[in-house]
Image: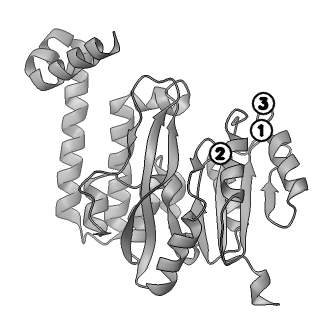
Amino acid sequence: MDKSSIPLVSVFSLVYNHENFIRRAIDSWLMQKTSFKFEIVIGEDCSTDKSREIVLSYAKKYPDIIKVITSDTNVGMRENSRRTKNACTGKYIAFCEGDDYWIDPNKLQIQVEFMEKNPDFSLCFHDAILLWDEKTWPPKYFVPLNQKEVSTTEDVIENYFIPTASMLVRAEYIKRLPEWFEKIYNGDWATQLILSTQGKIKYIDELMSVYRKNIGGLSGSIGKDVEFVNGKKIELLNYFNQYSENKYADLINQKIATLEKDIKINKLKKNNKFLFWLSNPKKSLLKISHHLLSE
């Protein structure tokens, strides 16, 4: 087979009820200017809106670029992710969910050029705009201003700073994920942790994507439940501790202690809001400031 006919990059996207966003996402992938071939692999999980109709219409128009992985029944996020990932044939996989999108036509070219020249890196990422769909909060940059150029496993354990819609990874490392990956809640963070053990992580200081945060949806409602989210993070960290053979045990235990403290504080807030705000004056001032600014 002619190597030039094999996609170098697979754009990986999971779609479920993204009718209002998916056209913009697909257009942002199609606008990429590259010196190599890439494919777009969309896992559509029986949406109840017009998402399937939209992605299939794009696939019909661009049959050499877009392939849609779907079925007659809903299979759930984990299975949809697994089958879509297995359908990716590229050396690299670029992530972008159906409600996010890219804003730079040179994104893939920039990232692939770096990865091709630096085989000791397993992942590269860039900055993104964090956009709240219901405009509860103003847009902001996702990546911290003081973000390091090269990050390691220790950095990924301590903080969540990599926008999913900015990630380009070596496909070989996520085609053989451990069994526990199927059990965890935060697949993005788990992927970043696992990849960090396979190579270094490069930050490309460019703004090239938009990450939507829809507080009205499932992720938004779950995101407010600190006890649930932190509990799932602790579960993931325990799995990763075993996976990494306790190499980062001290740092992981420190992170778990911080998450457990946040759970306790949240319980205090639920049980006695006055006592919570009294014991957290900084958060009280932030809450008041945000209320005044939104007036």
Mark on residue 51?
A: 1
39 with respect to 265 (left or right): right
Q: Is mark 3 on a helix, strand or loop?
A: loop
Q: Which of 217 and 177 is in front in this view?
A: 217
Q: Is residue 54 above or below residue 275?
A: below
**What residue is pinned by disc 2?**
98
Q: In this view, does 276 lie above or below 25?
A: above
Confirm whether residue 176 shows in the render.
Answer: no
Examine the image and state in which quarter residue 64 appears: bottom right
Q: Which residue type does callout 2 highlight?
A: Gly
Contact (Cβ within 8 Å) of mark 1 with mark 2: yes
Residue 182 in the image: above or below residue 227: below
What residue appears at the point 31 percent right and 60 percent down from the top-left corner? Answer: 156
Q: Name the residue under label 3.
A: 49
Secondary structure state at the residue bearing disc 2: loop
User: Which sits earlier in the primary sequence, circle 1 or circle 2?
Assistant: 1
Question: What whole-number distance in Å separates the C-alpha atoms at marks 2 and 3?
Answer: 13 Å
